[in-house]
Image: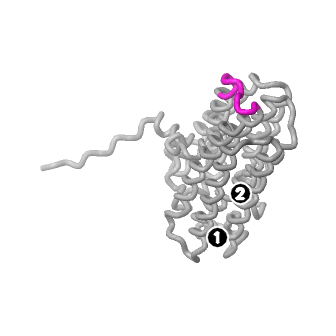
Amino acid sequence: MLTQQTPRPEPLWLTVARLLRWDKPAGRLILMLPALWAVVLAGRGAPPLPLIGIIILGTLATSAAGCVVNDLWDRNIDPQVSRTRNRPLASRALSVRTGIVVAFIAFGCACGLAFYLNFFSFWLCVAAVPFIIFYPLAKRVFPVPQLVLSIAWGFAVLISWSAVTTNLEFPTWLLWGATVLWTLGFDTVYAMADRVDDERIGINSSARFFGRYAAEAVGLFFLGTSLLLAGVGESLDLNLWFWLSLGVASVGWCWQYLRLRPRSPHPRVYGEIFQQNVGLGFVLLAGMLLGS
């Protein structure tokens, strides 16, 4: 007689890795990209290599901290959403105490890396912390919480640029605006996947705010991103490689908008568009490297 074997419990390190979203690298890369855009452009195509390493590690630590903080705030909401119900804190695979310890470790790593930066950049890191900590609360009180996330994303540009130049220039703010609009675009797409659950629970999102015009809003955000990136290219006198990469990205964003136009796109479309934006971000990074 065969006996049914009890599934082995997941190792703690693997559960913590899921809490940090290390099993989903796209979300980590999409934060890293604006930081790399900024350090490449501020360094005119030849940024200090040690600084690139600090920025890569810093975005990984910051992203990890943000994920844990988000899951701590949402541990009683996530079980009600199909996409998030299996997250470690939502499923009670990890305790709140463990989550808090992991969050402090991640913030500690980010802080340690920030001490490598100059005085101005360090305080920009400090200024970003409230946005990281309180973004999850925004969905409870603010109609477009993705804007708060986008501003947090924008700090990656300001910190990285100032780490090279010790100041902020006109092109910095153009790149910051492009990053904010780009983030608003792809994160609204991300929110569209959860719109039914969010409406049932009563959680705000940009997808709910724009309603049936969400696709048009995403299209306008991506259009604004293209225009602001064009302003960056013009102000920095970037060469043909940058303009080619911007052309590829702009065509990609147009195609994504068209995929969102049907009243009820296939659910997998939202995840595919999010993944595609990682690829488009790398295309732009290559264009910035070669075009500076």
Q: Position of residue 121 (x, y in %)?
A: 81, 31
Could one spot residue 104 in this view of the protein? no
Specify whether residue 248 is painted magenta.
Answer: no
Q: Earlier in the sequence, mark 1 or mark 2?
A: 2
Locate residue 240, reporting x and y percent.
Answer: 69, 45
Q: Residue at x 60, y 44 (%)?
A: 282
Circle 2 sits in a helix, a strand or a loop, which is it?
A: helix
What span is colored magenta in the figure? Answer: 43-52
- Which quarter of the image is occupied by the C terminus? top right
The correct choice, above or below, for 223 with respect to 171 in the image is below
Q: Residues within 10 Å of mark 2 (few under 14, many from 20)?
A: many
Count of marks overlaid on the render:
2
Quarter of the image holding residue 289?
A: top right
Q: Which residue is mark 2?
A: 184
Q: Residue 199 shows which numbered tag?
A: 1
Whether residue 144 is visible to the viewer of this picture, yes or no, is yes
| Amino acid type, residue under disc 1 in the picture | Glu
Numbered mark located on residue 246 in the image:
none
User: Magenta span: helix, strand or loop, mainly?
Assistant: loop
- Residue type pointed to by label 2: Leu
Q: Nearer the viewer, residue 176 or 6?
A: 176
Image point (55%, 75%), residue name = 264
Q: Residues within 10 Å of mark 1 (few under 14, many from 20)?
A: few
Labels 1, 2: front one:
2
Cα–Cα gap, marks 1 and 2: 19 Å
Q: Quadrant of residue 265?
A: bottom right
Residue 210 pos. (x, y %): 72, 70
Q: Of all residues shown, which one is farthest toward the left?
A: 1
